[in-house]
C-alpha cells in the first residue's frame, strides 16, 4: 500500500468573470467568488441560470470573455487546451447528472479510466485508488459486470470513484443526485461529503436538492448568470 | 549508385523491403498516435457497442480486399499454370491455320479438327538439322473421358523427364498413363472412338474399338492436360481408324520411328525438340512457310496473357473503384458511429484527456476494424483463389496452383496503410469537437 495521498486542496478565486453567448447574451457575470482549499459550496438557481456554465468555466472547458479563474495561482481560463486538459487531469474531478460511464466496461475500468491517458508512472496508483474508492463506496472492484448492469445510484458512485481515482484537489458535481431516487440520493450525498472530508478535497456542487445544499459549507445562488449571495450558511 | 545497389539485391529482398516500406507509414502513424497512451480498453468498448455494425464493416473491407487479392493471385496462377503446361512443348509444327487452335489441341488436348501434315512433310521435319525429337500425334480416341493419344516412345520419355514409373510401351497394345489418369500399372483399358466424353458415361454408348491396352508405365505429373491422358503407340491409333500404320509391309509390326512417308497417314501436329535452344529458332523459321506453320507455344501463350493483362487491368480498376467506394462508405459509417460516442469522448476530455487521446481511441477503433478486415480479406482472397485453382485444375487438367505472392502482400500492405491514414479522419474529427456541446447532451 502506498502512503495515503497528501491533502491537496486548492483555493479558488474568480475575478470579474464574464461569459457571453455568441449572440452576445450574457450567460455568466461573476464579480468575485472566493473559496478556501477543501471547502464545500452549493450552487443553486433556476434552470438556465448558468450553473452548469459556471462549472464549465471552473473546469476550463469554456473560455471566458473576461476575467480570471484562479485555482491557487493558476488561471485556468488563460491556459491552452492542452494545459487545461492536463490541469483537469491533475486537480479537478467531475461528476455529471447522468453519470456518463462507458457502458461496455466494468466498474473498475470506468473508475480507473484516467490511467489510460495518464503518464505510465501514475497508472498503477490510479488503478489502486480507483479500487479503494469503489470499495469505500460499497462496490466490488473485482466485479466484472459491465457498467450498464448497475443501478443509477451505483453508477453515480462509480462516477464518484472515477473522480476520486484522479486524486483531485476539487470535485465539480453538476446535479449529481438529480437522476437518483431519494434513498440513492441521500446515500450519494453522504458518500460525496465523506470523500471530500476524508481526502481534504473541495466540493462545488450544483444542486436543486435542499438536503444536499444544507450540508455544504456555503451556498451560492445564480440568477440569470449573476451571483446573488455567496455567504456562509 | 543507389539504384545499382537496389538492382543488385535478390528479388525476395527487394520485395521484402518494398513490403516494409509500404507498412512503415502505418507503424509511424500508430507510434505517433498511440505513444504514451493506453486507449485499448476504450477502443474495445467502442468495438463492442455496435458489434454487428462493426462486423459488417469488417466484412465489407474483407470482401473488397479479397477481390483484389484473389484477382491478382488467380491471374498469376492461370498464367503460370498455362505456361508450365506448355513447358515440354518447345516448338510445334502443324499445317497452316490458327496457332491458338493448334496449341490448344497439341498442348491442352482440346479436341479440334486440324488439317494434317503429310508423311513427306513429317519426314522433312525429322530430317532437319538440329532436330532431336519430332513426335507425331494422333488424337481421336478416349477412355472414360480421358484422351487416348498416340505418339512415340521418345516423346513419352521427353514428357517423363526420366521419371517414368514402370516401363515404356514396347508393343502394340501397351500404354503409358498420365499421372492423373485413374489407372494403375497392370490395368487394362479399352479405348472408344470419339473425343473426350463425360466421365463415367456408359461404355456401351461409345463406339468401342474392341481392343484393350495394358498400362505398363505411369508418367510423373507434368501439370498439363497430358496428365489425364493415356499415351499409346501412334501406330495403334492409326490402325484402329483403318489407316496405314506408318510402316511398310516389312516393318509392319515396328513401333516408333522411322516412319515410311508413303505409309504415313498424316498427323495434326508434330512436337519438335531441338538439340540446342538456339536451333529451335532456326527450325521455326525453316518451317514457317506456305505449306507448314511452326510456332512456340510459349510465345503464343505470352500473346494470350498480354490480352488477359488488359482484361486484368480493367478488372483491377473495377476492384479499385469498389475499394474506394467501400472505403468512403465505411469512413462515413465510422464517423457516424464515432458521433454516437460523442458524450463518452467528451467526458474523457472533461476528465483531463488531451485531444490526442481521443484521436488514439477513435483511430484505434477504426484502425482495428480496417486492419482486421484487411487481414481477413487477404486470407479470404488467398483462400478463394486456392479454391478457384482447384476447380479450374479439375476442369481443365491444367495444374493451376495459386500460391500467395508478393504482389498481393504489397497490395494489402498498401491498402492497409491507406486505410490507417484514412482512419485518422474520424479520429481527428472527434478530437476537434468541443467537449462542451457534447457533454451538455
Ligand atoms: N453555447 C451556448 N450558446 C448559447 N447559449 C448557451 C450556450 N450554452 C448555454 N447557453 C445558455 O446559457 C444559459 C445557462 O445554461 P446552463 O449553464 O446550462 O444553465 P443551468 O445549468 O443553470 O440550467 C441557458 O440559457 C443556456 O441556454
Ligand atoms: Mg445545468
Image (spheres, coloured by chain):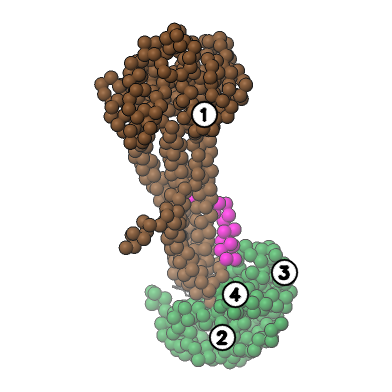
Chain colours: A green, B brown
Q: Residue at x 51, y 72 (%)?
A: B35
CA–CA distance between discs 2 and 3?
A: 39 Å
Badge 3 sits on which subunit? Answer: A
Front of the two marks 2 and 3: 3
| Local secondary structure at mark 4 | helix
Badge 4 sits on which subunit? Answer: A
Front of the two marks 1 and 3: 1
Of B351 and B97, nearer the camera is B97
Q: Residue at x 67, y 70 (%)?
A: A108
Q: Are marks 2 and 1 on the same chain?
A: no
Front of the two marks 2 and 1: 1
The residue that label 4 is drawn on is A115
| Local secondary structure at mark 2 | strand
Q: Residue at x 72, y 78 (%)?
A: A136
CA–CA distance between discs 4 and 3?
A: 17 Å
> Which stretch is magenta?
B40-61
User: In the visual, does B76 lie left or right of A168?
Assistant: left
Mark 4 and mark 3 lie on one chain; the one further toward the N terminus is 4
Badge 2 sits on which subunit? Answer: A
Amino acid at each position: 500500500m502506498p502512503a495515503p495521498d497528501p491533502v491537496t486542496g486548492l483555493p479558488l478565486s474568480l475575478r470579474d468573470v464574464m461569459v457571453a453567448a455568441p449572440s452576445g447574451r450574457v450567460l455568466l457575470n461573476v464579480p468575485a467568488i472566493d473559496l478556501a482549499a477543501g471547502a464545500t459550496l452549493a450552487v443553486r438557481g433556476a434552470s438556465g441560470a448558468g450553473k452548469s456554465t459556471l462549472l464549465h468555466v471552473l473546469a476550463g472547458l469554456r473560455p471566458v470573455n473576461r476575467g480570471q479563474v484562479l485555482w491557487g495561482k493558476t488561471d485556468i481560463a488563460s491556459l491552452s487546451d492542452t494545459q487545461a486538459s492536463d490541469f483537469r487531469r491533475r486537480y479537478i474531478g467531475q461528476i455529471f447528472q447522468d453519470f456518463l460511464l462507458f457502458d461496455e466496461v466494468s466498474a473498475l475500468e470506468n473508475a480507473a479510466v484516467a490511467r489510460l491517458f495518464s503518464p505510465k508512472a501514475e497508472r498503477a496508483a490510479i488503478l489502486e485508488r480507483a479500487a479503494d474508492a469503489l470499495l469505500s463506496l460499497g462496490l466490488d472492484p473485482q466485479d466484472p459486470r459491465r457498467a450498464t448492469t448497475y443501478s443509477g445510484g451505483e453508477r453515480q458512485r462509480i462516477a464518484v470513484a472515477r473522480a476520486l481515482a484522479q486524486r483531485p484537489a476539487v470535485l465539480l458535481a453538476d446535479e449529481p443526485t438529480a437522476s437518483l431516487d431519494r434513498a440513492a440520493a441521500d446515500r450519494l450525498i453522504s458518500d460525496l461529503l465523506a470523500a471530500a472530508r476524508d481526502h481534504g478535497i473541495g466540493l462545488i456542487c450544483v444542486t436543486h436538492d435542499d438536503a444536499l445544499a444544507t450540508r455544504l459549507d456555503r451556498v451560492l445562488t445564480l440568477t440569470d448568470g449573476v451571483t446573488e449571495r455567496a455567504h456562509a450558511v | 549508385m543507389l539504384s545499382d545497389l537496389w538492382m543488385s539485391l535478390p528479388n525476395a529482398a527487394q520485395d521484402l523491403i518494398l513490403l516494409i516500406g509500404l507498412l512503415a507509414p502505418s507503424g509511424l502513424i500508430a507510434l505517433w498516435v498511440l505513444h504514451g497512451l493506453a486507449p485499448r480498453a476504450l477502443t474495445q468498448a467502442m468495438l463492442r457497442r455496435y458489434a454487428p455494425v462493426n462486423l459488417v464493416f469488417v466484412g465489407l473491407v474483407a470482401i473488397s480486399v479479397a477481390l483484389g487479392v484473389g484477382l491478382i493471385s488467380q491471374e498469376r496462377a492461370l498464367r503460370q499454370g498455362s505456361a508450365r503446361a506448355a513447358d515440354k512443348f518447345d516448338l510445334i509444327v502443324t499445317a497452316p491455320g490458327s496457332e491458338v487452335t493448334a496449341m490448344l489441341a497439341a498442348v491442352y488436348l482440346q479436341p479440334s479438327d486440324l488439317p494434317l501434315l503429310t508423311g513427306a512433310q513429317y519426314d522433312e521435319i525429322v530430317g532437319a538439322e538440329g532436330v532431336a525429337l519430332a513426335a507425331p500425334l494422333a488424337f481421336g480416341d478416349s477412355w472414360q473421358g480421358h484422351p487416348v493419344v498416340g505418339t512415340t516412345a521418345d516423346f513419352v520419355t521427353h514428357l517423363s523427364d526420366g521419371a517414368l514409373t514402370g516401363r515404356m510401351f514396347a508393343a502394340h497394345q501397351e500404354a503409358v498413363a498420365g499421372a492423373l489418369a485413374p489407372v494403375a500399372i497392370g490395368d487394362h483399358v479399352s479405348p472408344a472412338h470419339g473425343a473426350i466424353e463425360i466421365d463415367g458415361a456408359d461404355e456401351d454408348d461409345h463406339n468401342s474399338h474392341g481392343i484393350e491396352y495394358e498400362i505398363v508405365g505411369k508418367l510423373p505429373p507434368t501439370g498439363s492436360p497430358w496428365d489425364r491422358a493415356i499415351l499409346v503407340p501412334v501406330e495403334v491409333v492409326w490402325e484402329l481408324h483403318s489407316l496405314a500404320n506408318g510402316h511398310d509391309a516389312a516393318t509392319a509390326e515396328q513401333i516408333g520411328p522411322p516412319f515410311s512417308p508413303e505409309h504415313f497417314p498424316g498427323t495434326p501436329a508434330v512436337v519438335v525438340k531441338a538439340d540446342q535452344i538456339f536451333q529451335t529458332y532456326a527450325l521455326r523459321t525453316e518451317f514457317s512457310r506456305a505449306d507448314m506453320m511452326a510456332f512456340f507455344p510459349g510465345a503464343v501463350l505470352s500473346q494470350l496473357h498480354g490480352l488477359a493483362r488488359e482484361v486484368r487491368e480493367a478488372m483491377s480498376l473495377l476492384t479499385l473503384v469498389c475499394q474506394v467506394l467501400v472505403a468512403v462508405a465505411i469512413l462515413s459509417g465510422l464517423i457516424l458511429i464515432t458521433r454516437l460516442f460523442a458524450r463518452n469522448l467528451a467526458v474523457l476530455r472533461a476528465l483531463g484527456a488531451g485531444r490526442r487521446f481521443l484521436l488514439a481511441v477513435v483511430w484505434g477503433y477504426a484502425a482495428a476494424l480496417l486492419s482486421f478486415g484487411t487481414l481477413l480479406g487477404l486470407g479470404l482472397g488467398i483462400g478463394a483463389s486456392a479454391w478457384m485453382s482447384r476447380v479450374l485444375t479439375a476442369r481443365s487438367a491444367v495444374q493451376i496452383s495459386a500460391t500467395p505472392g508478393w504482389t498481393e502482400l504489397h497490395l494489402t500492405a498498401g491498402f492497409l496503410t491507406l486505410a490507417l491514414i484514412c482512419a485518422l479522419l474520424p479520429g481527428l474529427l472527434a478530437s476537434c469537437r468541443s467537449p462542451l456541446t457534447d457533454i451538455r447532451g
